[in-house]
Amino acid sequence: MAGQVITVAQQKGGAGKTTLTAHLAVAWMNAGKSIALVDIDPQESLSDWHRQRMELLGEDAGITLRQVSGWRASTEVGRLKRDHDLVVMDSPPHGETAAKVAIRSADMIVVPVQLSPMDLWATRTTLDLAENEKTPAVLVMNRVPPRGRLPDEIRSIIKQLKLPVAKNTLGNRTAFAASMMEGKGVTEFAKTSPAAEEIDALAGELMRRMKRL
Ligand SMILES: Nc1ncnc2c1ncn2[C@@H]1O[C@H](COP(=O)(O)OP(=O)(O)O)[C@@H](O)[C@H]1O
Ligand SMILES: [Mg+2]
């Protein structure tokens, strides 16, 4: 079995990389995939979440995690691909080398973007890196407010620029953070919540995109 690799990347800190990585991993695990996570962010937020998960869920945690420095990531990913359906990598706000390695090792890049000009502009670096490495990338709109002029404007810029963007978006929902406090994904924590519905829909859409690659 050779698994597929998804790297969550975005130059801007606080965009939602770690949040997205954890919740997508759990959603894909629930959909029957075997999952390995790779954390190359020296801040280790994903590893902290995973540690909490192991402590609280023990054997049921169901997800492997490796913490590695950026330059070792490709070796580790190569190894993990052999016995997992999906390897999902969380990355730091671009330290150049680490981000390049993470993007080069991936079959698809997922780029969380909040609907602000700074977030949108910051996607350029990541999308360019992905293009240079010939890795397909997709934006995921995160913390989308229910309404407002600015988000609408940003959406229309994304459309005008023909940036690749997922149809499913995530709202600004406390359940995403609250579930992580307990080492869980939101689909385990609050199965029927809007947050769980959003992440399930997004996880499904991204899998369909992967199949088309
Ligand atoms: N959709 C969301 N709804 C509510 N809070 C969110 C959402 N996405 C991210 N956050 C919060 O935003 C902060 C930054 O998210 P994080 O995943 O750590 O970003 P990054 O890894 O890109 O630095 C965290 O406090 C997280 O809980
Ligand atoms: Mg992070």
Image (cartoon, rainbow, N blue to C red):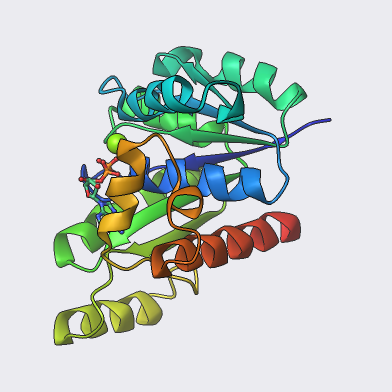
Write down the quadrant of residue 157 in the picture. Answer: bottom left
Question: Residue 125, percent across and down?
Answer: 31, 48
Could you tell me residue 82's position as x and y percent? Answer: 76, 23
Which image quarter holds the C terminus? bottom right
Estimate the x, y position of residue 103 in percent, counting from the top left: 49, 36
Q: Is residue 56 left or right of residue 176?
A: right
> As drawn, is 187 to the left or to the right of 17?
right
Residue 204: name its quadrant: bottom right
Residue most extreme to the right: 1
Q: Residue at x 38, y 31 (%)?
A: 99
The mark tally for this picture is: 0
Horizontally, is 11 left or right of 52 in the view?
A: left
Up/down of 29 relative to 163, above or below? above
- Residue displayed at 46% across by 47% down: 23
Q: Foreground: 40 or 26?
A: 26
In depth, the one of 191 and 172 nearer the eye is 191
Q: Quadrant of residue 153?
A: bottom left
Q: Is residue 188 visible?
A: yes
Query: From where the camera sits, is residue 16 visible?
Result: no
Looking at the rendered image, the quarter that the N terminus falls into is: top right
Q: Position of residue 79 (x, y in %)?
A: 68, 16
Viewed as shown, does residue 200 lie left or right of 147?
right
Quadrant location of ligand 2? Answer: top left
Q: Residue at x 31, y 22 (%)?
A: 44
Q: Residue at x 25, y 85 (%)?
A: 152
Q: Is residue 208 above or below residue 7?
A: below
Position of 76 relative to 161 (above/below):
above
